[in-house]
Image (cartoon, coloured by chain):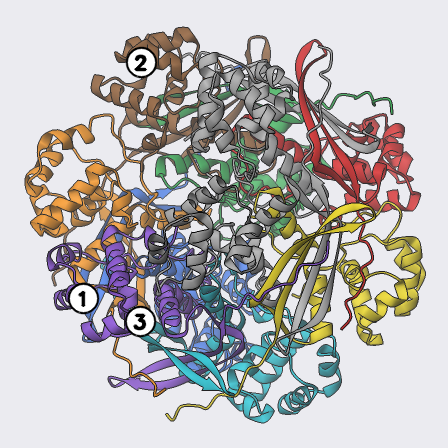
Chain colours: B yellow, C purple, D cyan, E orange, F blue, G brown, H green, J red
């Protein structure tokens, strides 16, 4: 069963409408006025939209406002994570936050990678990363940049051995 | 037992020499001519240096070349990962690579965060991430940028209840 | 599947009625005459109400008494816990009780935090705790106070790299 | 093997000196000028002291400054958690922070409970908890108060059955 | 989902009939002529009744003999355990048998405790146990007696902090 | 490695002295003036003795008071459990207490069974249990009595097949 | 849920027809012309029958050939195991094969034991085993013979304590 | 680390003496007057010998009686199992006993297979098993016979591809 | 439940159509113009086909293009793995890739083995493997060749012991 | 701790001698007259050599015959596997054999890959595999060929963001 099939019916409808409309998360994000990864996370039940964002989302996908607003009612708060088995995560809080990011945003990142690059992976071998200090809204932010070569799935033809 | 104490003796010596010299990974990286995160990963046994890099490392830390070269002999190849319990990782290869990055580079990233910011964490709540397509050496690369607010540990004083 | 969807149908009805009425746990608690966290725990199947409390609850939510009383019949006793995977809990009884509290009251606490503060978390970094001895009904009680900064979810906009 | 025996030698020395001096964490905390739970957490390797705090700690315990300062050298950063098996923690960040608190401060809390009450537990049955909004340093804080009856270990004498 | 909801339909009917009739396991046991814990275990699918016991059970609960006899047909043999996650049980056979008893009879014991005492637990702190040698049917038997204080659930009212 | 070899050195000495003196837990219990199971639990590090009990224990085993009193210094509090892998225990508190009893007293019970009966097990098949309400010190107590046939290990001789 | 209820519908029908006909695996085996354990394994989805065996099986159970032949179509190959959680099996291949036997044939063996002996177990205490070298079809075979006393379930009546 | 290296020193000595003397378990069994599998189990710490058997064993292996008798002192009782990770064993007692047999006698069986056949395995594919009812000492016994083809390890030479 | 029954409905239809048509993966592969293992992997949801391949597949199986193209819509990207429990995989990336291959292509390989050889296994005992360097599309490739004897399932007839 | 450090001392000596001599497994294999992967497996304790092979191995590595022959004495039989955590392997025997191959030969394959290619991995993305039927010694063999692009570790230099 795919992870989408395990989501609440309201979220399965989002994916269905998206497929029917043939929209990418990037296109939806532009219509909702939020980031692409955030919108993908919202589809996977990992974020809480405002009422205005729900309306824009419904419009973008051609879905009625009513059921969407009922689903994301004021007392709705997401149960984040749960899509990826988290197994035995590292206890150290600095390391754990890296796991939490994958737990909460992993499927959103995977979806955006696929929509932008196709079927494949970001290499962890031909890969580098760096840690920077950046400012956001007057506060120090940690910025981790992960860069890996794009590797498309490529199952090449095999010659059968003579038998 | 700290993860450093679980490393091979040769690696424990690196950390000891680094503490005695009072060097940061950034400073050592400049002397070795490699990236800071890579050097931290090397300390944790997650990378394979060239003979030249071993010599520069020894010089930077005031350690004799001989034992270092013997440790990283030509047939030495790192067993990467193993520092963080990986538990039940996601099977999907695109998601797995994100786990592998934490498994291999997690402690290096943690160390560099601490040396640059102090004792604390990168927030996964006041946080954003994006996925970009960048070019490196004429090939498409996936670039994931994680940005989270710096949160220093701050255990504030408590007033004891009257008893 | 959200944890609410995994509850018995009777409990799902409570959440549905609550959403329709737009009531917070605090408001329901005042009508039932019990504590807010206890009422939230009751919704999650972690407490046993008296017949009188069931009636007040039904009235508060606009639900018929009959099915509620049938659900919480005299021989009904909750199977507590089970909402959160408890994995490998600490064996030491003093430590275990802390886990048990999260296992039984965790979702109730999460719900009350969200209703009072919004979508976010209590920081475990900008955080302190203390242990006090207090008297309740003529007996010594251990009182543990956990205080952490409120961190609202804030996924800030990212500028896309030029590509 | 007790958790103390699993700590780094420097930390085992702290516990030994504490036992020899017959000091409670509360007494040490007063001499160091920090909170009791924080000091207990420091003993268990879950906190990073300032140089000044290291000196006060050494003085309080009758230990030489040198080795203590060497242990907590400027590039030392704790690997928090790891004392309690964290198994399969809840993925939801709001719930996870409750686990993290036990993972990081659990042994400190256990120690302070024992030193203040003796050998026993805080009941999770004769128990209540509440969630408050409090202000600290001009910011909203979540305050969770856990109150449970003190239950001392009491293994009463048994009469042997006639055989 | 409660453990009762996870049982085979035939067993769910037993619990439903019991609730409708308002019978305790003790009352049913008297009508079936077996022990109370055994009857509770039978409800949870952990025992194999004789044809005569099935008939008495049906009569006690006001259920038709036919479906009951079909469910417990001659080639039916219980798959015991499975209600409680047994995780990593102790390998030593003497210790394992203690786990097996909880695995097979745990829910039966819990049900009988609740019906006799109410909502709460047997304390493992204010607790003692002994091991005796007794004779049954001319053979040595090990008798382990576990005695713990009854602790009823008692979530006391909290005063809200001034805010 | 046997569980005794995993205990703190002070506890290993107790077992060694007991073997040298050829004493059973029952005999030691009579000299210490406590219950047999409690004394066995003390040997396994699962209980906290008073100063007076430590002295009697030392006398019974022919061990010097000094090291024993130093081991069980006033701020010593046992970390109970940990001898048996607790795996995935049941979350329900009523059921969990049964697990906790095995976790804390399991090895003590096993030792007393062996000393009283020999090498073998208490059957969980030829077995019964009951739940009683008894009074202790003016309070209700739950009493669970487990009775199982004694089964000694008996590996009978085999005839080898003709080959 | 019993293991039978977890099988594919075609297999559940086999068990149902067997119960209706009141046949033992031994009786079915004689009609199919295969071994009793193999037939029981077939019922549990652990073996692949020939077309002829399918026909005989259908005749023995009074089931139509068509659906049975469709279920066991030429490209059907069993996914063996999966009925018993295999957890952390031993990696050593010689030891693993013993686990595999239980994984594949465990339920078949259990069923045959019950049909031949009733409700109970083979003792692993009053038990012996031997290893022989035997010849089958001109090849060396390892033969392991496990012999354990039959222990029927016997939950004897308890006298209630005076209360 | 091999399982032998994980045994208590006394047991490691047995294996060492056996290797020096070049004795098989079958030869030792004849000198001790017990079954071969039982003797192998004794070497692995899974059985309790009588004083007489200890003396015969010492004589057979050329070891002094004293230390052997001290190791197997009257209050010594084996902690069986623990050599093979038991993971998530089946809860059903009839199935569990099959696991327990492997847990307790698995290494003994493996050793005897190797000494009788060489380096290889008993096939679980070219394999059959049966369940019989046999009489031992006037009681019904379950006898399970497992017969599998002997498969010796045979890593045949490979031709390297032209490169 | 077989792994096929756990797949999305679209994939179950593929297997059903294949059984009805009586086609092997090899035959379908020839019609689709891709490798046999890749086509089997596609059936198990482990690959992404082009629109042209979907059409050829539909034609080969006698299925309508529409639903197939809707299932494999442009934004569909497989969640690979998930059919086999991956448990605690090795963290080392070189070793992990071997696990990933089984996780993604395991069922495809199993299916092709069965269709080519029948019901049985590839021996890992009578087995060899080699590592070669080969060129593909102008790049170095690692080629691992695993060769093991074919072992068909063969449950031979047992003679029942006289009873 | 590397896997080599976890091996028996005799095996650690083999690796040390190999490093000192600067020999590859391929070179040693030629001197011993066995396959390269088999020899690497032997180093990791996963194979049983003949007396003649032990002598050739000693000669190749410049080690004395005596201790090597003592280590691989006639009754020595390897405990295979155990180097890689096998977690929750697939129960199906056809799939399991693939896991067993990695468990037993995984480190040998990794070592040979590194010695032949350097530091990196075999891609599982740019990858194909096929299944063939081949003849060896007059018997059908399953041959699985895995071919993946060689990906060398390449941590490229990062430009630091302006700060």
* Nearer-the-camera pick, J163 or B43: J163
Q: Is residue H71 visible?
A: no
Q: Chain of mark 2?
A: G
Measure the alpha-carbon separation of dots 1 and 3: 15 Å
Residue at 63% in and 52% down? B99
Residue farthest to the top, as pictured: G52
Residue G28's label in the rendered image is 2
Q: Is residue G45 left or right of residue G98?
A: left
Q: Chain of mark 3?
A: C
Residue occupied by mark 3: C37
Residue F58: percent from the left, percent from the top? 49, 74
Measure the alpha-carbon separation of dots 1 and 2: 58 Å
Q: Is residue C5 above or below residue J54?
A: below
N-term-proximal mark, 1 vs 3: 3
Which of pointers 1 and 2 indicates the residue nearer the eye? 1
Q: Quadrant of the C terminus of chain F?
A: top right
Q: Is residue J92 above or below residue C142?
A: above
Residue H54: percent from the left, percent from the top? 55, 43
Mark 3 lies on a secondary structure that is helix
Residue E69: percent from the left, percent from the top? 15, 30
* Nearer-the-camera pick, B77 or B156: B156
Measure the alpha-carbon separation of dots 2 and 3: 59 Å
CB atoms of marks 1 and 2 within 8 Å: no
Residue occupied by mark 1: C57
């Amino acid at each position: 069963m795919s992870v989408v099939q395990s989501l609440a019916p309201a979220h399965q409808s989002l994916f269905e409408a998206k497929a029917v409309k043939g929209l990418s998360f990037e296109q939806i994000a532009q219509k909702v006025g939020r980031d692409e990864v955030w919108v993908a996370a919202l589809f996977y039940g990992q974020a809480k939209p405002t009422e205005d964002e729900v309306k824009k989302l419904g419009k973008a996908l051609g879905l009625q406002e009513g059921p969407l607003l009922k689903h994301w009612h004021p007392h709705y708060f997401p149960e984040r994570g749960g899509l990826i088995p988290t197994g035995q995560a590292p206890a150290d809080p600095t390391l754990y936050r890296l796991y939490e990011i994958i737990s909460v945003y992993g499927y959103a990142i995977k979806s955006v990678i696929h929509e932008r690059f196709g079927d494949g992976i970001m290499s962890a071998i031909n890969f580098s990363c760096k840690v920077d200090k950046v400012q956001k809204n007057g506060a120090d932010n940690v910025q981790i940049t992960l860069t890996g070569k794009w590797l498309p799935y490529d199952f090449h033809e095999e010659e059968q051995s003579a038998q």
